[in-house]
Image (tube, rainbow, N blue to C red):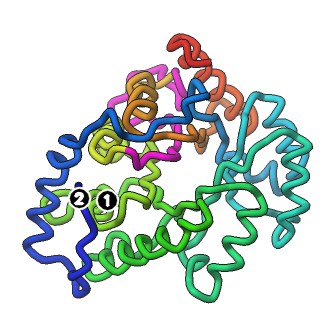
Amino acid sequence: MVHVNENHRNGPTRRDALKLAAAGAVAVAATLPTLPTFAADKKRAGIALQLYSVRNDCAKDFVGTLKALKEMGFEGVEFAGYHQFGGKAKELRKVLDDIGLQAEGCHIGAGSFDDNNFDKTVDFHKELGLKFMIVPGDGRFTKPDKCQEYADFMTKTAEKLKPHDMYCGHHNHTHEFGDYMGSTFWDFFATHTSKDVILQQDFGWTVVAGKDPVEYIKKYPGRTRTCHFKSKLPKGAPAGAKPFIGEGVMDWKGIITACHTVGGTDWMTVEQEDYPDGLSPMQCAERTLSGLKKILGEMNML
């Protein structure tokens, strides 16, 4: 099993490069049948929406938007801010419970895990009932002189969260897949953090970066506890393709299968950032959810 090298505090060495090169083979050689999958009493991972997808709607009417998302068929939400409920976790939890939505997780700055902020961060999000707190970006991630520092910080944070049954992780865009030490910064982070740190793949951005989402789920088994189901159109996409799940070029059945058999996925979190043909963000969220459910139905997973 790939482990965190506690001895490297002054940046990566040649040994790190060799470890990265071998990481894929080591991960694939793991005993896959013992890996965590979604809870045995459930047929599939839950379906949530990252609320950044409908951020303007949330700003205008947060509670009304949450109600509309439940009516669409979403089971949970991943927060990207709390609007009028900042610092009011109990009140927001009651709203969610009344609507019937689960707090899947949130996107949160790494500074929220600093010693001065850690306790209040945990208390607020525990009250909401969420487990997964994901950093959507950090400048240290792709800096050769800072990436080890950031990896160590996230491993330390994951250890501090364990007693609370909560998790931290990092979310990718495209630059995290930039070349580094014979592999990528994403691979460096994966091999220099503990297995408790979530690798929240945004499958759309992974494809745009020229990488295979399924390959990366399998490369780091059990670490895709949450992930972003985003449809993006890479260069060369055929005319008529749309940035909605099931209407583009991405291998969603392969991704879904890998999530459930290898990734240990608890939540499939839809994110919609493209709004074509004059459609509103809410209309686009509903359309891509319909595409996902159609595919799940074909896989007998609804």
- Which contiguous range is marked in magenta? 222-246
Does 84 appear above or below 144? above
Q: Specify whether residue 235 is in view.
A: no
Kind of residue indicated by mark 2: Val
Q: Position of residue 79 (x, y in %)?
A: 69, 55
Instruction: Kindly identify the amino acid type of the residue bearing the numbered disc 1.
Output: Ala
User: Which residue is identified by label 1?
Assistant: 190
- In this rendering, would 5 be left or right of 228? left
Residue 241: in magenta span: yes
x then y, percent, for residue 74: 72, 34
Helix, strand or loop for disc 2: loop
The C terminus - image quarter:
top right
**Would you identify the image quadrant in which residue 249 lies?**
top left
The Cα atoms of the two marked residues, 2 and 1, are separated by 9 Å
**Is residue 95 visible to us here?**
yes
Judging by the rendered image, the residue that carries numbered circle 2 is 2
Q: Is residue 69 above or below residue 95?
A: above
Look at the numbered discs 2 and 1 and tell me whether their residues touch, using CB distance below 8 Å.
yes
Quadrant where the image shows the N terminus:
bottom left
Left or right, residue 48 beside residue 143 = right
- Looking at the image, is 181 positioned above or below residue 61? below
